[in-house]
């Protein structure tokens, strides 16, 4: 009896110490939402080593790295069409003549981290070899290349169970021994926010984004979503995100064709959502406006706030919406969004509003406490909550404020 109990004790200790029983993923990797760049939104599969090296250089010279962006992620299209005779994935030798290890070394040499893409199905969405059945082998290969981040897609998965597939890959990464952020990309089809907290660090919540403010793009059998459509799908899942496990409303489209106002609104709202900030534009050709959006440190700080609490919609009327996000030190971010096609004047008397939120335990009465107001895009202080806020907000524009409590 005693020796059986002893054996049970050893089994439990082993399971816990290998981390395999409950928490598969590497902890502590994404205490704030991951920040980086990904090749898909602007290049799809049209990537190659030289242009990516130039992109890495631009990542650094543009100030992105200094603003907090860390990961450089290759999306679909980096592989050869076939595995080799050992069943290993191979980088496309035409696109990557120096091989993937050399490219990863280049990324690391610039003080960045390296990410790569594959898919839980038999093939990736663009038809390259998928990982199904090769999970441990692929994870070992990525670890040997120095991969720090894996985005794992969901095409060609007809008979595959999503939870099992993502859990298997999470365990494979763990077994390969190199800490990697694991980014689940099954488009929210199986409500990953309910089960993926211990599986990966982020999970996509919707179908793909495109660079449109409020109109989806229809491709016949599927649609990509506008920024506003994706925003509207986030409200009911905010309670599932937090340090180490994030809702991912997809990568950024800043600099990919929307207007300056729309790009600012998109970026502001993703920061209000505590979303991963994965830029998806051509870093070699950024306009000064695009750069100024992506590296606005005060707006990024709202995204990266250590509390990790997503915003909620406080108010919505006639195309005007107000989002509120609790920040550390009893501060708040408040974002006024004008979704309408006309300019709107706001006259917002703080003292007429009580802001309460169970999730972030906010209970604010502006008659009892005063807050200073800082406009995070104009980068200036604009008074306090003691006076009504009067501003004009253009169509598709935001006014993003940080409120700091006056003691
Ligand atoms: C899916 C993903 C995209 C991208 C492509 C690559 O559509 O959602 O983000 O990775 O596949 O083929």
Image: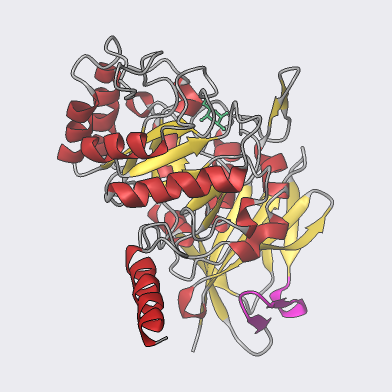
What sort of colour scheme is used for the picture?
secondary structure
Location of residue 101 by image quarter: top left
In what quadrant does ligand 1 lie? top right
Q: Say if the magenta span includes residue 396.
A: no
**Can you name the residue that lies furthest to the left here?**
109
Residue 115 on image: x %, y %: 34, 38
- Compared with 118, 178 (above or below) is below
Number of numbered markers: 0
What's the residue at 39%, 14% (across, down)? 82
- Front residue of 383 and 21: 21
246 relative to 162 in the view: left or right: left
- Compared with 53, 2 (above or below) is below
**Can you name the residue that lies furthest to the right here?**
318
What's the residue at 73%, 72% (across, down)? 349
Location of residue 315 by image quarter: bottom right
Work out whether residue 373 can be spotted.
Answer: yes
Task: Give the magenta-colored segment's residue range.
Answer: 349-364
Work out whether residue 394 can be spotted.
Answer: no
- Front residue of 294 and 113: 113
Residue 48 on image: x %, y %: 31, 16
Q: Say if the magenta span includes residue 358.
A: yes
- Compared with 89, 151 (above or below) is below
Q: Quadrant of the N terminus?
A: bottom left
318 relative to 225 in the view: left or right: right
- Compared with 332, 214 (above or below) is above
- Front residue of 190 and 110: 190
Residue 307 on image: x %, y %: 48, 71
Residue 293 on image: x %, y %: 45, 43
């Amino acid at each position: 009896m005693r020796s059986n109990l002893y054996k049970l004790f050893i089994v439990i200790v082993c399971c816990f110490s290998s981390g395999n029983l409950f928490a598969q993923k590497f902890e502590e990797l994404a205490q704030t939402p991951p920040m980086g760049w990904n090749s898909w939104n602007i290049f799809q599969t049209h990537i190659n080593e030289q242009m990516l090296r130039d992109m890495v250089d631009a990542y650094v010279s543009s100030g992105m790295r200094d603003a907090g962006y860390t990961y450089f992620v290759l999306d679909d299209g980096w592989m050869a069409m076939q595995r080799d005779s050992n069943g290993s994935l191979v980088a496309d030798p035409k696109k990557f003549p120096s091989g993937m290890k050399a490219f990863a070394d280049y990324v690391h040499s610039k003080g960045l981290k390296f990410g790569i893409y594959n898919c839980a199905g038999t093939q990736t969405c663009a038809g390259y070899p998928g990982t199904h059945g090769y999970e441990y082998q692929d994870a070992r290969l990525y670890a040997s290349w120095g991969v720090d981040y894996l985005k794992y897609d969901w095409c060609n998965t007809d008979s595959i169970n999503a939870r099992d597939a993502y859990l298997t890959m999470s365990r494979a990464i763990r077994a390969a021994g190199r800490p990697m952020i694991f980014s689940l990309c099954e488009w929210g089809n199986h409500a990953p926010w309910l089960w993926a907290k211990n599986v990966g660090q982020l999970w996509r919540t919707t179908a793909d984004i495109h660079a449109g403010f409020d109109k989806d793009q229809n491709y016949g059998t599927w649609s990509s979503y506008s920024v506003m459509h994706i925003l509207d799908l986030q409200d009911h899942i905010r309670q599932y995100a937090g340090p180490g496990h994030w809702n991912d409303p997809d990568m950024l489209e800043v600099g990919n064709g929307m207007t300056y106002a729309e790009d600012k609104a998109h970026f502001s709202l993703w920061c209000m959502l505590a979303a991963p900030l994965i830029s998806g534009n051509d870093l070699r050709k950024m306009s000064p406006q695009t750069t100024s959006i992506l590296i606005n440190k005060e707006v990024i700080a709202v995204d990266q706030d250590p509390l990790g609490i997503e915003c909620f919609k406080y108010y919505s009327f006639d195309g005007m919406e107000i989002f509120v996000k609790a920040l550390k030190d009893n501060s708040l971010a408040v974002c006024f969004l004008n979704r309408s096609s006309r300019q709107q004047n706001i006259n917002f008397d703080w003292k007429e509003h009580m802001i309460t939120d169970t999730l972030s335990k906010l209970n604010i009465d502006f008659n009892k406490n005063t807050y200073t107001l800082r406009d995070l895009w104009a980068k200036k202080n604009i008074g306090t909550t003691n006076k009504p806020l009067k501003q004009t907000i253009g169509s598709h524009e935001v006014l993003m404020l940080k409120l700091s409590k006056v003691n």
